[in-house]
Amino acid sequence: MDDNTLKTFAYINISSYRVKAIKAMQEGNETPTQIANNSDIRLSHISKVLKELKECGVAECINEQERRNRIYQLTDLGNEIADNLE
């Protein structure tokens, strides 16, 4: 991992919610409800977690124009970090 990836990994790893969300997203493209169900995080917290993951380049919304049922996936950086999480 390069320095930027390592910094992002450390940022992800300090939050159990971010770690759980990334692990849930490894399954493939997911809606916030699916991520919440698969990670045991309340849906009310998922929006904040997804915003943080998008801001650091780990996740992306593939249908941003939709108001409901947005679909999120891990980026290449997100997949690299997910592969290194315990």
Image (spheres, rainbow, N blue to C red):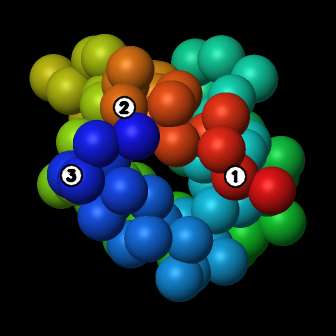
SS category of the residue bearing label 2? helix
Q: Position of residue 79 (x, y in %)?
A: 53, 28
The residue type indicated by label 1 comes to Leu
Residue 77, label in figure: 2
Left or right: 37, with 23 as reference point: right
Residue 4, label in figure: 3
Cα gap from disc 3 to disc 2, whole angstroms = 10 Å
Q: In the image, is residue 67 above or below residue 5?
A: above
Cα gap from disc 3 to disc 1, whole angstroms = 16 Å
Q: In the image, is residue 52 above or below residue 81?
A: below
Q: Quadrant of the C terminus?
A: bottom right
Q: Which residue does the image show at 44% across and 59% down from the upper left? A: 9
Q: Which residue is mark 1?
A: 85
Q: Residues within 10 Å of mark 1 (few under 14, many from 20)?
A: few
SS category of the residue bearing label 1? loop
Q: In the image, is residue 41 above or below residue 86?
A: below
The residue type indicated by label 3 comes to Asn
- Is residue 43 visible in the rendered image? The answer is no
The disc, 1 or 2, on the residue closer to the chain's N-terminal end is 2
